[in-house]
Amino acid sequence: MLEDTRPIRLTLEPLDDFVVIEQSDEEAETRGGLIIPASAETQCRSGIVTAVGAEADGVAPGDKVLFPADGGYEVRLAGSAMRVMRRRELIARIHD
């Protein structure tokens, strides 16, 4: 049995109008006072856009966004919870 100890680097490159979001696990409060809880009972979640497809207009990597808790597809990538969803599912961009 051979063991390969090389680290595997995985990235997601979204297609079409899909975006990849790294989910936030903490409650966040914006400078304007908007509190975004991370509890599973909330209907909205927040995260940082890490990649966008060629047709995903209006968002860019690094944008902080609000999205439905049950929207898109949850993916675990290198131990991080990622969400892949269509651009039209995003609710808002958060400006701190």
Image: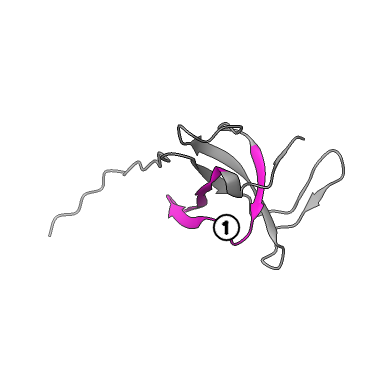
Q: Is residue 47 left or right of residue 95?
A: left
Find residue 73 and report its horizontal and vertical position in percent. 49, 57
Farthest-out residue, right: 33
- Check if residue 91 falls in the magenta segment: no
Q: Which residue is mark 1?
A: 71
Colouring of the image = one colour
Task: Judge by depth and name the residue closer to the eye, 85 or 76.
Answer: 85
Q: What's the magenta bit mostly, secondary-structure-wise?
A: strand
Find residue 59 and report its horizontal and vertical position in percent. 60, 33
The residue positioned 59% from the left and 62% from the top of the image is 70
The residue positioned 70% from the left and 68% from the top of the image is 41
Task: Judge by depth and name the residue closer to the eye, 21 or 91.
Answer: 91
Farthest-out residue, bottom: 41
Type of residue at label 1? Gly
Place residue 13 in its image quadrant: top left
- Check if residue 79 falls in the magenta segment: yes
Q: Quadrant of the N terminus?
A: bottom left
Find residue 29 and report its horizontal and vertical position in percent. 80, 46
- SS class, disc 1: loop
Q: Is residue 3 left or right of residue 12?
A: left
Find residue 11 and report its horizontal and vertical position in percent. 39, 41
Q: Is residue 17 left or right of residue 8?
A: right
The residue positioned 63% from the left and 50% from the top of the image is 24
Place residue 65 in its image quadrant: top right
Task: Judge by depth and name the residue closer to the eye, 8 or 60.
Answer: 60
Q: Quadrant of the C terminus?
A: top right
Magenta region: 64-87
